[in-house]
Amino acid sequence: MRVLSGIQPTGRLHLGNHLGAIRQFVDLQSRAECLFCVVDLHAMTLDWDPEALRADTLQIAALYLACGIDPERSIVFVQSHVPQHCELSWLLGCLAGFGELSRMTQFKDKSRGRESVPFGLFAYPVLMAADILAYRATAVPVGDDQRQHLELTRDLALRFNARFGETFPVPEAFIGKVGARVMSLQNPSDKMSKSAVDPAGRIELLDPPDVVRAKVRRAVTDSGREVRHNPETKPAVSNLLEIFSLVSGEEMSTLEARYGDSGYGRFKADLGEALVAFLAPIQQRCGELRAAPDHLAAVLRQGAERATALAEPTLRDVRARMGLVAGG
Ligand code: TYM
């Protein structure tokens, strides 16, 4: 099994990114060869600020390590440091259709109401396919919202293989049973998101303890007083229970038994503390890593070298199969 995944450096990482993606990355690194990248080129598909992009890219790399990704075991790198991603993106783009790219829900959502839609936003899922296929990855740990992009990646791999001969394994999405769709604390029918304007709906991994407590205190709940897991009738409380269970490691049934009838107050107070305890070591380690920029730069340099050594043979094969003349 070879694993690849990535996170965009747009805004700050939140609990959804951790529980849906990073938690699985950490888990998989003892079982598979893993590559984790900061997908900086994907963060340029809508308006961006160059200084913020630079800072966020380093912040995400530091958070990867702070959350437990071990650069001795996994390859940690920045997407733009490995130019093979862009090259493969063009080559795969020549096999992708206008219709299928227009149907991507994230493209439809993000382009809606814009006077001018950047080509990068349209081409986004092809670059994501290139990220994965450049390494012939077989498993892609992601949250539920990336399912459709993964389907497109699989279609492009199959199309390439059918036309040019068996080249790419068809990668599987690796989506957790719980945590794959962490919802907003303010509106449980929307996913927790980096781009929502109001930060009250998301717990950011670097939120200070008092901010975490306040966001949990202000989280919306459902009618009634019982703390029960039932996403249909109690979507808000079910979301909080899932978060509680994932960050504390306690079974949902244990939490229901403890808080079931004692009202929302104590439940929320304890959830706030559980989150603070969960985030504290991540925040401390992240601070240490940001204070040692040379170390982080060396990790990323070495990661890019290792990633390039894996991607270049794939590209050599792809170029030849597609009819490009070998260079000197
Ligand atoms: P991005 O940066 O939006 O999100 C990073 C990861 O976090 C997951 N996620 C969530 N999981 C659970 N609940 C949520 N509320 C939540 N919000 C986000 C996402 O599903 C994702 O796994 N296109 C990708 C980045 C990408 C990529 C790739 C991923 C580029 N190339 C190659 C895998 C492989 C994205 O925008 O993720």
Image (cartoon, rainbow, N blue to C red):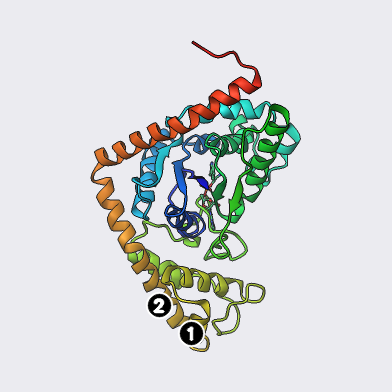
* Above-or-below relation of 49 to 189: above
Look at label 1 and name its amino acid.
Answer: Tyr
Say left or right for 121 vs 271. right
Q: How many labels does the image show?
A: 2
User: Residue 5: where, in percent of width, then height?
Assistant: 50, 45
Question: From the Cβ of disc 2, is ligand 1 less than 8 Å away?
Answer: no
Residues packed near mark 1 inside 10 Å, few (<14), some (14 to 19) or many (20 plus): some
Tell me the residue that label 2 is attached to. Answer: 270
Q: Image quarter for residue 314?
A: top right
Mark nearer the N terminus (2 vs 1): 1
Residue found at x 34% / y 34%: 301
Q: Can see residue 37? A: yes
Q: Which of 314 and 45 is in front in this view?
A: 314
Tell me the residue that label 1 is attached to. Answer: 259
Looking at the image, do the residues carrying marks 2 and 1 touch, with CB atoms under 8 Å apart? yes
Residue found at x 73% / y 32%: 162
Residue extending farthest bottom: 261
Residue extending farthest right: 99
* Above-or-below relation of 230 to 17: below
